[in-house]
């Protein structure tokens, strides 16, 4: 049985960040348990490799989870890809660096999460960041996480931005200074230094890989699946895990940090007897601590896709000669990190208000230089593009629950998509606006054939039918171990599990509400802030 000062469960965006930061102190020992592998293969490092990772066929660095049937989506089960490797979902995502709106964090603080306002989290965003544009009052220039401008955005993406401008949407260069309304190109978590220019900069590549094997006080175990938190009374003292088919245990002298994500962290708590009795008792798990908020408050961004085929072939497609056309791009990426293989796929961004009188954007657009259907699990012959539409602030709330006491079984995931009709109404308004932008020159000239039966003159009832038939997650689950000060909060504003000792949760599950954008950068910020808390507690 091994013993360390800190044991971290999960080496994803939060866990990789936290392990690296805590182990900067040579006087403490840190153990990181990660169920997946190292997360450093070519398919991870090459940005365009995401198209092979996200579908989960086969499960390369991907948990490839599923929801329970969703009544709001006509009984369909939703696919939930999550990263399974050091770096977690930052090893398989589109690399988009998005912080959200300043009001998102001020709202957290207003709910009792002291220390989490925009002005208070901004220093931790800056600490993490090494922005290619340099350091200023809102961006960092010397952090581990390299943030880049896109290397080779395609002409069709620029046509999308011009079309939005003609529709009188403002263009902006920076979505991360506190106000994100407008259209432009996403910045991406991609290396911009000369040695690795154009490669994906996952949280592991940024924080963990450079120090693995170099710090005597840091132990990283890959292929190690956590199965239970061990308690002595109300204090968490260790973690059981499986490695190489054997059950093992590691002890924590100071603290255990769960960084297993919005699905994994509540599941491990429940497997360990922490949560609601009605969720845990039926599976024969002994109760350790009643905490009714565990697994509740699941929120996610529901996404609806518009797509067109195009005769233009300066994008991704399937057909005769498509692979051959990628050869010079592969050479360019290998040479200097440029070309189409450096793409995040989702090149163009839009944050917009779908109704007058709104205080901040309530919808986000991702303009993608290829046809995405069912998470790239269904392929289409030919070339094309698509426009993703999501409602930023969903009212629907779901849950994560045990379906089995088997620690190797997946959790039950029920986002309850569209259980609140207001989310559907936002998506309908946003989809209409998005389609109008596509039909505006100069983007309109690229449109050869619209897919999925979407057409001019659709009624709201027809839009509803399309959305319920085809919408699914855009991969931003949060909230299942909510931070707060009320009885349903799972962690306090310093991320300590309420009513227990020696246990924190550090990942997107602690977010009380969704931020207005992609969740990877905020998750890394949370880990930076947690490291500060835990360092101060020494």
Image (tube, grey):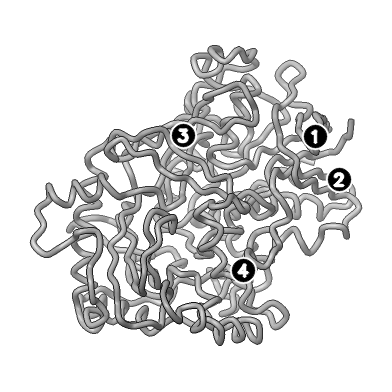
State the residue position of label 4: 200
Please state which of residues 57 and 111 is positioned toward the viewer in this rendering. 57
State yes or no: discs 1 and 3 in contact (Cβ < 8 Å).
no
State the residue position of label 2: 28
| Label 3: how many Cα within 10 Å (few below 14, some 14–19, many 20+) | many
- Real-space Cα distance between discs 4 and 3? 29 Å
Q: Is residue 254 above or below residue 51?
A: above
Task: Compare marks 1 and 3 and give the one earlier in the sequence.
Answer: 1
The reply, left or right, for residue 320 in relation to residue 252 is left
State yes or no: discs 1 and 2 in contact (Cβ < 8 Å).
yes
- Real-space Cα distance between discs 1 and 2? 10 Å
State yes or no: discs 4 and 1 in contact (Cβ < 8 Å).
no
- Real-space Cα distance between discs 4 and 2? 30 Å
State yes or no: discs 4 and 2 in contact (Cβ < 8 Å).
no
* Quadrant of res 158: bottom left
In the rendering, which numbered label is found on residue 59?
none
Mark 2 or mark 3, whichever is nearer to me: 3
Rendered location of residue 341, percent (x, y): 54, 76
Mark 4 or mark 1, whichever is nearer to me: 4
Task: Compare marks 4 and 1 and give the one earlier in the sequence.
Answer: 4
**Mark 3: which secondary structure?**
strand
Quadrant containing the N terminus is top right
**Mark 4: which secondary structure?**
loop
Task: Compare marks 2 and 3 and give the one earlier in the sequence.
Answer: 2
Residue 6 visible from this viewpoint: yes
Residue 532 visible from this viewpoint: no
State the residue position of label 1: 254
- Real-space Cα distance between discs 4 and 1? 34 Å
Q: Is residue 111 above or below residue 301?
A: above
In the rendering, which numbered label is found on residue 413?
3
């Amino acid at each position: 049985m091994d013993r360390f000062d800190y044991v971290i469960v999960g080496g994803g965006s939060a866990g990789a960040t936290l392990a690296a930061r805590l182990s900067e102190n040579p006087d403490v020992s840190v153990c990181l348990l990660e169920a997946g592998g190292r997360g450093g293969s070519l398919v991870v490092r090459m940005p365009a490799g995401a198209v092979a990772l996200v579908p989960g066929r086969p499960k390369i660095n991907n948990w490839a989870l599923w929801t329970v049937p969703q009544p709001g989506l006509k009984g369909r089960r939703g696919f939930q890809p999550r990263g399974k490797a050091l770096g977690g979902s930052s090893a398989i995502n589109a690399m988009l660096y998005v912080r959200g709106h300043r009001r998102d964090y001020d709202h957290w603080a207003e709910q009792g999460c002291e220390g989490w306002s925009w002005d208070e989290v901004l220093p931790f965003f800056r600490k993490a960041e090494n922005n290619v544009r340099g350091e200023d009052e809102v961006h960092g220039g010397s952090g581990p996480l390299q943030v880049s401008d896109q290397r080779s955005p395609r002409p069709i993406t620029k046509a999308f931005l011009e079309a939005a401008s003609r529709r009188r949407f403002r263009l902006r260069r920076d979505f991360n200074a506190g106000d994100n309304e407008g259209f432009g190109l996403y910045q991406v978590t991609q290396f911009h230094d000369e040695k690795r220019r154009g490669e994906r900069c996952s949280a592991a590549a940024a924080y963990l890989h450079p120090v693995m094997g170099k710090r005597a006080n840091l132990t990283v175990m890959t292929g190690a699946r956590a199965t239970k938190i061990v308690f002595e009374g109300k204090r968490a003292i260790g973690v059981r895990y499986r490695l190489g088919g054997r059950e093992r245990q590691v002890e924590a002298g100071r603290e255990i940090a769960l960084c297993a994500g919005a699905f994994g962290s509540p599941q491990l708590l429940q497997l360990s007897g922490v949560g609601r009795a009605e969720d845990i008792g039926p599976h024969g798990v002994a109760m350790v601590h009643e905490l009714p908020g565990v697994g509740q408050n699941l929120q996610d961004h529901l996404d609806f896709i518009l797509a067109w085929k195009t005769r233009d072939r300066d994008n991704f497609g399937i057909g005769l000669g498509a692979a051959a056309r990628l050869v010079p791009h592969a050479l360019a990426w290998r040479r200097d990190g440029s070309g189409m293989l450096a793409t995040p796929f989702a090149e163009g961004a839009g944050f917009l208000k779908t109704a007058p009188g709104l205080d901040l954007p309530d919808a986000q657009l991702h303009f993608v230089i290829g046809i995405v259907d069912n998470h790239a699990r269904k392929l289409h012959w030919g070339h094309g593009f698509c426009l993703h539409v999501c409602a930023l602030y969903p009212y629907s709330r779901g849950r994560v629950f045990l379906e089995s006491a088997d620690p190797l079984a997946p959790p039950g995931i029920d986002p309850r998509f569209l259980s609140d009709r207001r989310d559907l109404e936002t998506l309908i308004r946003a989809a209409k606006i998005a389609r109008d932008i596509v039909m505006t020159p100069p983007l309109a000239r690229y449109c050869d054939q619209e897919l999925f039966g979407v057409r001019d003159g659709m009624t709201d009832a027809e839009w509803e039918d399309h959305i319920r038939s085809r919408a699914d997650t855009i991969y931003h689950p949060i909230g299942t171990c909510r931070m707060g000060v009320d009885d349903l909060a799972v962690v306090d504003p310093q991320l300590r599990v309420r009513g227990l000792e020696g246990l924190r949760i550090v990942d997107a599950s602690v977010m009380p509400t969704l931020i207005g954008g992609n969740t990877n950068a905020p998750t890394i910020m949370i880990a930076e802030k947690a490291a500060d808390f835990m360092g101060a507690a020494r």
